[in-house]
Amino acid sequence: MTLLAWILVFSLLGGVLSVLAAATLLVVPPRWRDRAMPHMVSFATGALLGAAFLGLLPEALERAGHDSLHAVTGAVLGGLLLFFVLEKLVIWRHCHEDRCEGHGHDLHAGSRRRSAGALIIVGDGLHNFVDGVLIGAAFLTDVSLGIVTAVAVAAHEIPQEVGDFIILLDSGYSRARAFVLNVLSSLTTVVGALLAYLGLSATSAALPYVIAVAVASFIYIAVSDLIPGLHRRTDLPAGIRQVVLIAAGVAVIALATESLHAHGG
């Protein structure tokens, strides 16, 4: 496949297919979904951290060269601060809980709940657009890195989309409309990937810093959103399962990275 074809296929994987998987989870009995969600979040945490530290960051540092190492690590730090500010401004939405203050899920007035649902769509679209840019930038760096990045994006998008579906349904949207709106917002992943392909192809010097922002994005999602939710389960068996699944997520990314590089990406 051409590079553009790789980017299109895997940006769809990170966006639309994540919505389809999330929609499938909504048709299973709620008690099964409630059991599966914490396991999916644990695995997604490991996948994001594995992609950030084992795939993206080493590649960004290698491409930047010794003279720019501090600039790349500074870009990671700046990205973390940027995502914090964006979340404070209610632009960046990452919530996997059925009830989430940031999503306005417990608002009682009907009109305000509809507004909260609309905000979810806008925020999710912006988030998916950024994910697309990161996927596109990763593929421009290396095909194997792009695949690993897309897998990590899909891993955290599925539980997020389930949470978004639940919020939209609670806001008064029908299942069909909630599904269509989520699919439309997921298409911004493809838009972001295409713009990255068109804009970054001729500016390879910027790639290490875009990848550094991807590192910051993955770390921020894992540490500020996913891990705090896992800490709500304090019993020992749940903690053991979380550690095992986080390690499994890291291992999958590590094995995928090694295998793809071994086969020439």
Image: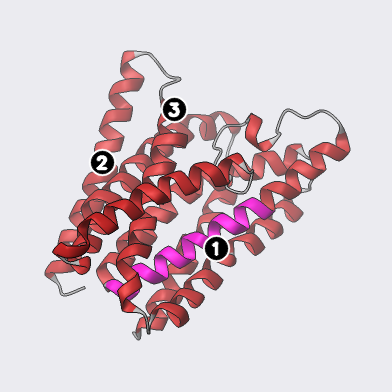
Q: Does dot 3 land on a helix, a strand or a loop?
A: helix
Image quadrant where residue 135 sits? bottom left
Label 3, label 2: how many angstroms apart (C-alpha)? 19 Å
Inspect the image, locate mark 2, and give the three-letter code of the amino acid beneath it.
Ala
Q: CA distance from mark 3 to mark 1?
A: 25 Å
Neighbourhood count class around disc 3 (C-alpha, 10 Å): few under 14, some 14–19, many 20 upward:
few
Query: Which mark is in front, 1 or 2?
Result: 1
Query: Which quadrant holds the C terminus?
Result: bottom left
Disc 1 marks which amino acid? Phe
What residue did someone put label 2 on? 248
Residue 262 in view, yes or no: yes
Task: Give the labeled residue for mark 1.
Answer: 129
Residue 207 location (% of width, % of height): 33, 70
Residue type marked 3: Pro
Q: Is 139 situated above or below 84?
A: below
Residue 228: give its label.
Answer: 3
Nearer-N-terminus badge (3/1): 1
Q: Residue at x 59, y 58 (%)?
A: 126
For image coordinates 42% across by 51% down, the residue present is 79
Q: Quadrant of residue 128?
A: bottom right
Q: Main secondary structure of the magenta part?
A: helix
Left/right placement of residue 27 relative to residue 199 reads right
Return the disc, 1 or 2, that comes first in the chain's sequence: 1
The answer to whether residue 131 is left or right of residue 115 is left
Other-residue count near label 2 (Cα within 10 Å), few / some / many at <14 / 14–19 / ≥20: some
Discs 3/2, front: 3
Residue 57 image position (x, y, % from top left): 25, 55
In magenta, the rendered stretch is: 122-141
Q: Any magenta on residue 5?
A: no
